[in-house]
Image: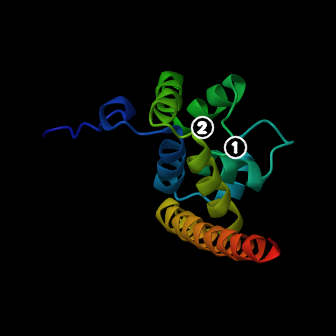
Amino acid sequence: MKKEKKKSNQETGEGIEELLTRLRKEKGWGYAEVLQHLEDKTLTEKDIKKWEIGLKYPDLDMIYQLSAIYQIPSEEFVKAKNNSYEKGMLSINMITIKWICYFLNVSLKVGAVILVLLYIFLFAFSLFFFTTMASQVKRAY
């Protein structure tokens, strides 16, 4: 019988956000079940959600706890965290997309589309504003 080998997050380039989401879903857990297994009672479901979106990252102590409950080496979490940094997950656009996703409870792709539409709207508004202001300046002289 052949053993099926799982790809490590380094091979797939999986970020910590994807790793945490995948592991939680593989266990069939919600945010509340993850909290029950963690020792830190100050955490909330919002904290777990922020980790999975990438607005916050777990600290080293929490990585050790997560590796224990998901039964994978803590090095996998550290590699995934590094992959997130390498992907540019902390760029200003990505942070804005993550906040949109967090507040609207949508996927990263939908958040990206919303951000692009917001940029288009802001560009159109600023173009309208400046052309209106320029025409008023000409009339004054």
Give the number of the disc on residue 53.
none
Disc nearer the start of the sequence (2/1): 1
Q: Nearer the viewer, residue 44 or 112?
A: 112
Residue 116 in picture, x, y percent from top left: 52, 65
Most extreme residue toward the left is: 1
Residue 53 in picture, x, y percent from top left: 60, 51
Give the residue displayed 56% in from the left and 69% down from the top.
Answer: 114
Per the image, the residue denoted by label 1 is 37
Per the image, the residue denoted by label 2 is 69
Give the residue displayed 64% in from the left and 75% down from the top.
Answer: 128
- Looking at the image, what colour scheme do you see? rainbow
Give the residue displayed 61% in from the left and 70% down from the top.
Answer: 127
**Disc 1 on helix, strand or loop?**
helix
Query: Which image quarter holds the C terminus?
Result: bottom right
Give the residue displayed 57% in from the left and 31% down from the top.
Answer: 67
Q: Nearer the viewer, residue 111 or 70?
A: 111
Q: Nearer the viewer, residue 140 or 124?
A: 140
